[in-house]
Amino acid sequence: MEYIIIIISAVFVNNILLSQFLGVCPFLGVSKKVNTALGMSAAVTFVMALSTLVTYLLQYYVLVPLGIGFLQTVSFILVIAGLVQMVEIILKKISPALYQALGIFLPLITTNCCVLGVALLVVNNEFTFGGDPHMLNLGQSVVYAVASALGFGLAITLFAGIREQLDLNNVPKAFRGVPIALIVAGIMAMAFMGFSGIV
Amino acid sequence: MAKESSFKNMVITLSVICLVCSALLGVVYSVTKAPIEAAELAKINNAIKAVVPECDNNPSEEMIEVEGSVVYPAKVNGNIVGYAIKVKVSGFGGPIQMMVGFKADGTIYNTSVISHSETPGLGAKITGEIPTRTQIVGKNPASSNLTVTKDGGEIDAITASTITSRAFLKGVDAAYKVFVELQKQQQPWEN
Amino acid sequence: MGKLKLIAEGIIKNNPTFVLILGMCPTLGTTTSAINGMGMGLATLFVLVLSNITISAIAKLIPEQVRIPSYIVVIAAFVTIVQLLLQAFLPSLYETLGLFIPLIVVNCIVLGRAEAYANKNSVIDSAFDGLGVGLGFTIALTILGFVRELLGSGSIFGWKFIDGDGILAFVLAPGAFIVLAYLIVLFRKVTAKKA
C-alpha cells in the first residue's frame, strides 16, 4: 500500500520536474517529438533505478561504516557515469537501432540532474509517506526512483505533444524556441499543483 | 596533445586523480568538522533559548532521550524551570522539526520551528508570530483542547493551511506526551 | 584575448542562462529570492573558476578516453569543498540551497566550459573565462530571484515593503518558469538592439 502512495506522490504530487525542478535541461532540449521523448524516458528510468540501487548500497555499506560520508558527491557521480557508460556499451550490442535513435542523449543522462538528484534525496532526506518522517529502505528507494522517472517521462511526453502542436502555430517571433517552451512548462506546473494535498 | 589512451595510462590517470581528490577532501573535511558541529549546536541552542524561561545551566549538555525525542532541561540554581523538547512530525511538504518549551508545571512557554518544507506564503507562516503559535502559549495541554477549530479545538489554523497547522499541533501534542513520560520516569526518585 | 573581454563575453554574449540555456535546474529551483539566487550563483562561480584552472593545468596529462570522468571527479571535488565550507560557515544559506549545491556537479555549465574552453587554453585565460561565465550566471540568477521576490513576497533583498504576501504564484513553481521566459525575451530584445 505504501508503494502506491510513493508512486502517486512521485509522479503527480511532487513531480520531479514540474515541482522539484530536476531534469529541466533535457526537458527543454529533447522534447520536440513524442517518440524521442518516450525513448529518453525509458533510458532515464532504467538508469535511475539502477543507480539509486547501487548508490544506496554504496552509502550504507561503504561510506557510512568507513566514516567517509564527505565522498558522497564524488562517488555517486562516478557510479552514475560508470553505469551510463555500461548502458551505452550494452545497448550498442543488443539494439544498435535504439542506440542510434537516442544518439547524443544517452551520455547526457550522466549530467541529468534528476539521476544524481534522486540518488541523493533517498539517502539524505526523510520522507513523510503515510506517517512519521522516516528514511526509505532499499525497496522504497528504488520504487521512488522508478516512480520519479515515470513522472519525468510523463511530463516530458505531455510536453512533446504540446510542442508538436505549437510548431504548427504562429508564435510571436521573440518568444520562439525556449521562452514559449518555458511558459508552457509554467502552465503545466500550475496544473500539476492541483494534485497537492492528495497524499 | 593529450597522453596516449592506453588502458594502463587511463587507469593510472583516473586512479591518481581520484586519490588526490579524496586526500584533498579528507583534509578539508577534518578542518570543517568542528565549525560544522558548532553551527549545528548553535542552531539547537538558539531554539532552546527561544522556548524556555531563562536558565543558568547548559541544556544541550544535559540532554535526555525519552521515547525517541530529545529533552533539554533548563535549570536555575539546580532547580528545573522548564523543558525544551525536540520533536519531528510530518508536515504538508515534508518533515517539520520543532522545539516545544514547557514550564515545570506543564504549561507551554513557547515554540520554535527549526526546519520545515512547507509552502512559501502559506504553511511557511508557521515560523512567524501567528495565532496558531501564540494562542497555545500559557495553555496546559492537560486541560486545554489544543487542536484546530475545524477539529473541535480552540486554536485558529493558518488560513488555507490546515494541514500544516494540524501537523504543528500534532508536534506540540507529541512533545507533551514526551513531557508526561519524563515525569513518570522521574517519579520514583522524587518520592 | 583581452581578459576583460573574456569576462564581458561571459556576461553577455555567452550568458549561460539567457543565451546558452544551460544550468536550468538551479536557475529555477533556487531563485525564490535575490539573496538565494546570488548565493547559488557565487557558489557555482567558485567551482567554475577553480575547476577551469585545474583542468586547464592538467589537461595535457589526461588520456583522451578518460577525459570526461576525470573532469567530473575534479569538479565533484570542488563542489564537495563548497558544500563543506557552506555547511560550516554559512549554514542558513546551505539549508536554503539544499540539494542544489551537490547538483552543481551536473550543472552543464561547469562541465561545458571545461570541455569547450579550459582544456584548450592557458590557465590564466581559463580562470577569466570561468569568472566571466560565473558572473553571467550569478547576475542572471540574482535578477530572476529579484523579480520573483519582488512580485511574490513583496520584498527587495529581504526588506519587505508591503504588509502580507505578494502574488504567491511567483515564488512557486509556475512563477519560476514564466518569469524566466519573459527575462529571456527581454534579454534578447535588449542585446539585439545593441548588435
Image (spheres, coloured by chain):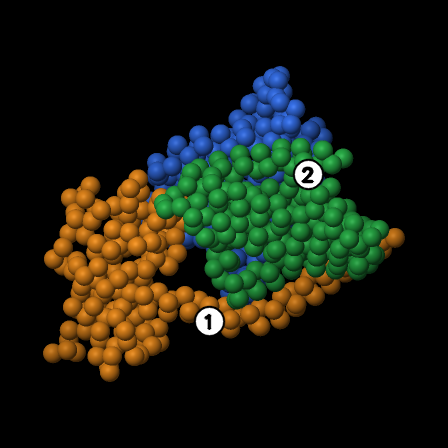
Chain colours: A blue, B orange, C green
Asked where in the image residue B114 lies, by quadrant, the reply is: bottom left
Whether label 1 touches label 2, CB < 8 Å: no
Circle 1 sits in a helix, a strand or a loop, which is it?
Answer: helix
Q: Which residue is at 67% across, 48% downward?
A: C136
Measured in 3D between alpha carbons, the distance from the residue under mark 1 to the one under mark 2, in whole angstroms, is 42 Å
Identify the element where label 2 is drawn.
loop
- Determine the residue positioned at 39% across, 52% down: B116
The mark closer to the camera, 1 or 2, is 2
- Which residue ends up furthest to the right in the rendered image? B1
* Residue B23 screen position, x and y as percent: 66, 68
Residue visible at 62% across and 50% down in the picture = C138
- Determine the residue located farthest toward the bottom in the rendered image: B77
Relative to residue B168, is residue B78 depicted above or below? below
Front-most of residues C171 and A95: C171
Kindly indicate the quadrant of the structure image that contains residue A41: top right
Residue at the spot of label 1: B38
